Amino acid sequence: MTDNSGSASGAVFDIRRFSVHDGEGIRTTVFLKGCPLRCRWCQNPEGLESRFKPVWLSGACIHCGVCTKIEAAVRPGSALPELTPRAWDAVMDACPAKALVWDGRIMTVDEVITEVAKDAAFFAYGGGLTLSGGEPLAQPGFALALLEKARGAGFHTAIETSLFAPAEVVESAVALCDTIIADCKIFDEARHIEATGQSNGIILQNLRLLLTERYARKVLIRTPLIPAFTADEENIAAISAFVSGLYKDVDYELLNYNPLGAGKYPLTGREYYFTENPKPFTAEETRRFKDVARKNGITKEVLYDRVYA
Ligand code: SF4
């Protein structure tokens, strides 16, 4: 299944350096475009669609009007019109401030690994490549080729995944990863469909596959704490009982709500679900969720107390 030629290519929307939250040590995180889920709280809305869209960067725009001269339908600050990719390329090339850009680009495996290798000196202190998204396993050939090439270069490899992917793809990824960070957002199927647009059946089945003696030590299960969707005692209890029942020493993370994702929505032309952006949970609130997890079988719970300005 893996194309390790280095010339395999895929859609990437970001490469973020010096991340300390996407696995062990200092990570270079590569974000692959496209996701089969539509979580109402998605923090990376630019990664949802697999096709590229133009984005207007208001802070960079110098309001020179060049774009409108080239395409009359382009008005900075208004909804961006449907143009052919070639027409958008012409507008973007002409913009002197680079305020009109695509929300991602096609890269080959070799191009990505060359970028990641620039950070290799930092990996000596722990760290490596993390694939994220979107859902990285929605581009299985590209994701697996990246992991294989990274391993060949001696990099530690990790993946952040919703596990909404065929079991054989998940198993191929596990074989090429040192760490799997797997989301389990909502246990109740009807609530999962309502919040993400998809059943969680395939996700729970993949969790049964991962949380076996063979793979479980590589796996961190993560539940993002999202007000009104995931962050309630019943859901945390059900997930904790399920994953600890599969593997009693499971690593489990409760990830506090990140309000910063809301700021990306105006760039993507999407509306954020929360009209009033919630605050992250307080230390006391998160402690209560941890207690629920512990009472339901989790012995190695982790809570990253991230600070969001
Ligand atoms: S060409 Fe670029 S900088 Fe000039 S108005 Fe258009 S988007 Fe803004």
Image (cartoon, rainbow, N blue to C red):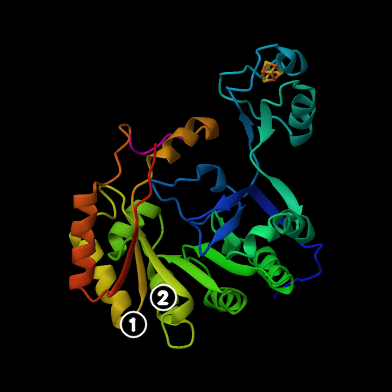
Residue at x 53%, y 62% (from the top left corner)? 25
**Image location of residue 120, percent across then percent down:** 69, 60
Q: Earlier in the sequence, mark 1 or mark 2?
A: 2
The residues colored magenta run: 270-274
In magenta segment, residue 272? yes
**Image location of residue 8, percent across then percent down:** 77, 62
What type of secondary structure mainly makes up the magenta span? loop
Which is more toward the observer, 137 or 27?
Answer: 27
Image-based side of 123 in relation to 256, left or right = right
Q: Marks 1 and 2, how far apart in space?
A: 8 Å
From what the image shows, is residue 56 above or below residue 200? above
User: In this view, which residue lies farthest toward the front?
Assistant: 125
Answer with the quarter of the image where residue 154 lies.
bottom right
Image-based side of 65 in relation to 135, left or right = right
Residue at x 37%, y 40% (from the top left corner)? 259
On residue 246, which mark appears? 1
Report if residue 302 is visible in the image: yes
From what the image shows, is residue 304 above or below residue 167? above
In magenta segment, residue 140? no
Report if residue 232 is visible in the image: no
Identify which amino acid the numbered label 1 is placed on. Answer: Leu
Q: Mark 1: which secondary structure? A: helix
Which residue corresponds to mark 2? 207
